[in-house]
Amino acid sequence: MKPARASLCLATLFLLPAIANAQTAATLGNNSINAEEIRQIVSSNAELNQRFKASADAVEPILKEELVRRALINEARAKDWDKQAAVARQIEQATNSVILSTYVASLSTPPGEYPGDPEIKAFFDANQGKINTPPRYRLAQIFIGRPANPQEAQAARQRADSLVKQVIGGGDFAALARSSSDDVQSRERGGEVDWIEETNMTPEILALVRTMKPGVTSDPVETQAGWHIVRLLEFQAPSPATLEQARPAIVNALRSQRASEISRAYVDDLLKKTPVNIDRAALDAVRAQIK
């Protein structure tokens, strides 16, 4: 279901309770994560905010993964890894890419009030029959979280395999989810995740459920967060969207289109003011040196 954990990675679908911004939430040696940083991670994904009923325990896989990442980065920097010529070039390229994309975005952002109702209605009318609601799936899962220690991953996978065998052998899926799932919120509902749109699924889960029929239980599917044993409860095919259902997608499409138009106009104006001058002789000289 969608990255990073956008959807069925339910061990990461949470919103932390309010705590002081400066409060340290987790540490690994000299590396730490504070509450404000966690809020930023959560707020970057709308699905995470919709899952605010889970225990704070659900944040542990993300905190462990991020702390390990920071520890490795600091270790590499302490060894001047970022000073190596090849690495430095990649860093410069990545930095320039971020500067360029964010600067162009700042230049081409449409006015906040765009599009208005007339533009939205006109787009909807012109595309009726082409705008559908995405496919939706009602799912249940038993989730086994990925241990922070990689050496424990095999045992976690074996635990997931064992649970599948119990389900195949006639075990009650809901009861096993309540007793064994690591996802706090869905565990309380016997593993039920409720309806999820196809656009909100991680690729691993989406590829799986597209092949399933209602009532079928999957083998463990691995994502970055852990292993998911998925049961498809219901499937809802695409259907023509109403104007209100389509409004968010139409707004995004029109704003993206307008941003592209503004960006192209800015570049065209830049080139008119300062035309590009290409030295053909210099190009030919370089070309001659290439074997």
Image (cartoon, helix red, strand yellow):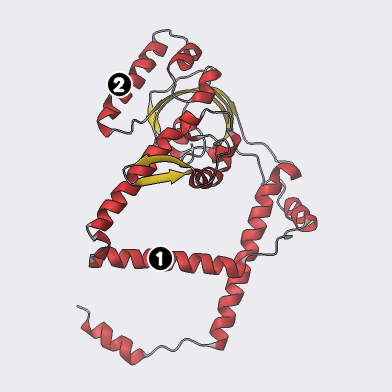
User: What residue is drawn where x is 63% and y is 62%?
Assistant: 257
Looking at the image, can residue 209 be seen? Answer: no
Quarter-of-image position of residue 79: bottom left
Sequence-earlier tag: 1 or 2: 1
Q: Position of residue 20 (x, y in %)?
A: 55, 43
Q: Position of residue 175 (x, y in %)?
A: 48, 11
Decide: is 2 above or below 234: below
Q: Position of residue 51 (x, y in %)?
A: 57, 33
Q: Residue furthest left?
A: 291
Amino acid type at circle 1 is: Thr
Residue at disc 2, secondary structure: helix
User: What residue is drawn where x is 40% and y is 65%?
Assistant: 95
Q: Position of residue 189 (x, y in %)?
A: 56, 18
Mark-to-mark CA distance, 1 and 2 = 42 Å
Residue that label 1 marks? 95
Q: Residue furthest top?
A: 170
Crowd band around label 2 with a 10 angstrom C-alpha radius: few (<14), some (14–19), many (20+): few
